[in-house]
Amino acid sequence: MNSTVTTGTNEKVWEGGNQPLNASYGKLMMWFFLVSDALTFSGFLAAYGFSRFKFIETWPIADEVFTHVPFFHGNFPMYYVAFMTFILIMSSVTMVLAVDAGHKMKKNAVIWYLLLTIIGGAIFVGSQAWEWATFINGDHGAVETRGGRILQFVKADTGERASLSDFAKTIPTSRTQHENKNGIWFFDEGYQPSYNLEEVVAGLKANPNIVIRTESIHQEGEHMGHKTVLNREESLNKIKEGRLVVEGANLIHNEYGSRLFADFFFFITGFHGFHVFSGVIFNLIIFFNVILGTYERRGHYEMVEKVGLYWHFVDLVWVFVFTFFYLV
Amino acid sequence: MAQAHNLAIFRGLIKFKSNTQKIWGVLIFLTIITAIEVALGIIKPQALTHTYFLGMKVLNWIFIILTLVKAYYITWDFMHMRDEKSSLRRSVVWTPIFLVFYLLLILLLEADYIYEVFKNGFVTWNF
């Protein structure tokens, strides 16, 4: 008895007119898109994992790279990223509250919650821009070797990082930066570091308190998990391999260590930041639509729900980026 | 539209009176997890960084598990997966999980092999 009774509409589940998954076309398509986008991000993060496992003993330590907080000086690893994570989770909450208010057809509540969501998204994108600027400008400066490895400098007595400006000598030279107004107009020299290699080497030789820190991470012993610091003699020997002074990071050089780290940083956080940016745009569009009463007239706020799905997804991706880029 | 919300989390351990309350409850839970992650990331207890489980630091396992817990609650409560039909839920969730797990398995094994080549093979990279 129980298995034979069917009603008319249920028999034609796949013949249109009803929703087998109990979700509207638009919502279903949003889920499809999110699945494919999740795979794109997973591809990036898996590629990051690939490069990291490949260079597991020399990969930069994120705690030592992201140590800045706006308006404060000092060493604050992770604090600002944690703040950004919280902002994004918070804006996810206001979004889901907007969706909830939409179900109850409370127009004004939807407007306010959407506004808060947009502000949260804007703060996040701004923070990311600041994080990029800090990363690109660099911290202490380093020397790149012939093989593309990075040599950083530390003070032998305290173990603190030493900036190039702490010890590099200034050697008078007649060399000036080539500017396109002085020579061939289409040839520009581009950015030059504040000190050239000769000045850094001379500074290292003259200052007995400066030693080199290499990219290699101790795999055992009492310094396990820390980068290798050479003694004075080894440092003077190692600097001979230096070829280039590096300040900050771009797609080709990276003072923090492996260049791939900078490449993935720009690629993954950039792609995510682009998602947040477009999410803010979508939120703005539906924000104005809600004010104009478009969904009130339509009779339902499902569009808020669909854009909300996208917005939560952006938050979801950030949770993973945060773990794999900053924590692990 | 799914008007009826499932208001219980932690397998019915905590039941909320309204959807709004549930949202704030989940926010508190997610904040606590993030705080734990950040605290562990700053302190890095030796007991967790120096012990390995299946070739990975115990601390990293904790981070990954906490991340998956966070992902679960964002998807289930913020994206309303809890209220969707199980067929939709399964097709959205298990497809990426299968594909990503497969991709990670291949790429990380391959990366470890290349690491071994750099380490033990006749390849000079540190000069």
Image (tube, coloured by chain):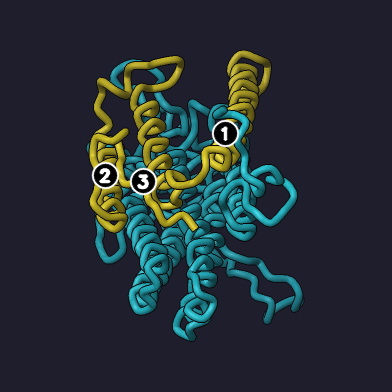
Chain colours: A cyan, B yellow
What element does badge 1 sit on?
helix
Question: Would residue A67 be found to the left or right of residue A251 on screen?
Answer: left
Chain hosting mark 3: B
For marks 2 and 3, the one nearer the N-term is 3
Q: Which residue is mark 3?
A: B6
Q: Residue at x 48, y 26 (%)?
A: A57
In the depicted structure, whether residue B70 falls above or below residue B97: below
Callouts 2 and 1 in the same chain: yes
Specify whether residue A275 is in view. Answer: yes
- Name the residue carrying label 1: B94
Residue B29 image label: 2
Other residues around mark 1 within 10 Å, as few (<14) / some (14–19) / many (≥20): few
Residue B68: x and y in percent read 42, 36
Q: Respond whether the residues carrying marks 1 and 3 are from the same subunit.
A: yes
Q: Tag 2: Cα neighbours inside 10 Å, few (<14), some, or many (≥20)?
A: some
Cα–Cα gap, marks 2 and 1: 24 Å
